[in-house]
């Protein structure tokens, strides 16, 4: 049995076994999420699901043999710090600046250890801040995506699975083992989190998954030089993580355009907008998973395509998002027209 398979099985089994323990602990400690005008679940739901995911990832790392490598212990340590600040936010509502500071410090620690993106540029004064920014962005993107039952862990499992395929193609064994552990941990947690969720990841769990995927996407090598190679494989992480990026960017744009605080939670996420078009919440989640897989799987082909083929694949991915945007615009136009018809003819204010 390969190390990648061992890591996946161990992480999946650990998540299945430990999530009920985390649920019980959360209830006893009072770390639960209660419904309000924005959160529509019924009753208090435990928030410590991320603890089970973290423990499962550690189990997967150990089973796959990468826990013995200092590089991966460093990644786990930094991820643990991000998880803890997320739990603090769940319990005490930590200020946004403190969360971002801890996330940036954890990302900087990873970079200082030598894990950083180069993008064919060796200047550390350029690559280091870009890497920190990427990791922090991915960390928060998965927290943004954790807005509907099963959405964030399911998308994380898909992204990790695609990255594993790339690792297998390119012979990156340790990275593949680590990503198999992350994906399987998310997958093992999913049965408890799918609608109706019995436990939530919490900010701790969502930030944890985002940090691990952001970091591991940097730890991988996508570009391998030969006479026929193109730099197009460098776009692979963007394709694999396109859905979380799209959700975060679109929500921030909506809030900015409306003049609302960027950090104030609302129901304008990608999933909520699909529900507004008439989908059920389960259908919206499945649709986003399908989009994540359809776009992400293209990353496995970039290394074997020439410029023309790679450009076609990237245009295809952009086309999927264009379809989504057009659907949303049509839906909003339809709602506005329906609202005008329901109000009926209005009197001319000048003759009142």
Image: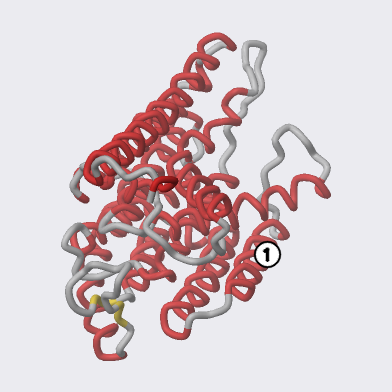
Q: Quadrant of residue 148?
A: bottom left
Residue 3 is at least partly visible in this image:
no
Which residue lies at the image location 73% right of the left edge and 32% below the top edge? 120
Q: Is residue 108 above or below residue 328?
A: below
Residue 258 x/y as whole percent: 53, 54
Residue shown at 30% from the left, 50% from the top: 154
Q: Is residue 266 above or below residue 29?
A: above
At 50% from the left edge and 19% from the top edge, which residue is drawn?
Answer: 315
x and y, in percent, of residue 333 in the image = 35, 35
Left or right of 221 in this view: 185: left
Q: Is residue 257 visible?
A: yes
* Number of callouts: 1
Instruction: Return the x and y of residue 3 as percentages of the image width and height.
Output: 37, 48
**Callout 1 crowding tier (Cα within 10 Å): few <14, some 14–19, many ≥20:** some
Give the quadrant of the N terminus: top left
Compare residues 273 and 20 and report the one nearer the observer. 273
Relative to 200, 87 lies left or right: right
Which sits in the foreground, 240 or 80?
A: 240
How far across and how far down the image is residue 179, in percent? 43, 49
At x 50%, y 30%, the residue is: 170
Q: Front-most of 277 and 165? A: 277
Left or right of 99? Residue 173 is left
Looking at this view, name the residue that lies furthest to the front: 351
Q: Which residue position is annotated with label 1? A: 109
SS type, badge 1: helix
């Amino acid at each position: 049995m390969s190390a990648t398979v061992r890591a996946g099985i161990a992480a999946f089994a650990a998540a299945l076994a430990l999530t009920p323990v985390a649920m019980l602990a959360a209830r006893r400690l009072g770390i639960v999420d209660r419904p309000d005008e924005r959160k529509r679940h019924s009753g208090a739901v435990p928030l410590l699901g991320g603890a089970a995911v973290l423990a499962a990832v550690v189990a997967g790392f150990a089973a796959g043999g990468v826990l013995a490598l200092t590089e991966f212990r460093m990644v786990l340590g930094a991820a643990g710090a991000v998880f803890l600040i997320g739990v603090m936010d769940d319990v005490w509502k930590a200020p946004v600046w403190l969360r971002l500071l801890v996330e940036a410090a954890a990302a900087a620690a990873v970079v200082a250890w030598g894990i950083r993106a180069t993008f064919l540029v060796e200047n550390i004064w350029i690559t280091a801040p870009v890497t920190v920014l990427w990791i922090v962005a991915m960390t928060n993107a998965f927290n943004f995506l954790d807005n509907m039952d099963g959405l964030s862990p399911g998308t994380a499992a898909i992204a990790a699975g695609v990255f594993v395929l790339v690792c297998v193609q390119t012979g990156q064994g340790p990275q593949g083992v680590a990503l198999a552990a992350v994906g399987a941990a998310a997958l093992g947690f999913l049965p408890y989190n799918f609608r109706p969720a019995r436990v939530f990841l919490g900010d701790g769990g969502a930030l944890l998954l985002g940090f691990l995927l952001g970091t591991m996407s940097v730890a991988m090598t996508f570009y391998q030089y030969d006479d026929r190679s193109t730099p197009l494989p460098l776009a692979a992480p963007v394709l694999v993580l396109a859905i979380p990026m799209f959700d975060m960017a679109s929500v921030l744009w909506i809030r900015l355009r409306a003049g609302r605080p960027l950090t104030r939670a609302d129901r304008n996420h990608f999933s909520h907008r699909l529900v507004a078009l008439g989908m059920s919440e389960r259908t919206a989640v499945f649709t986003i998973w399908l989009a994540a897989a359809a776009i992400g799987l293209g990353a496995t082909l970039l290394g074997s395509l020439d410029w023309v083929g790679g450009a076609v694949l990237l245009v295809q991915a952009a086309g999927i998002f264009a379809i989504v945007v057009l659907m949303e615009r049509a839906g909003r136009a339809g709602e506005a027209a329906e609202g005008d018809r329901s109000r009926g003819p209005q009197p001319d204010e000048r003759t009142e």
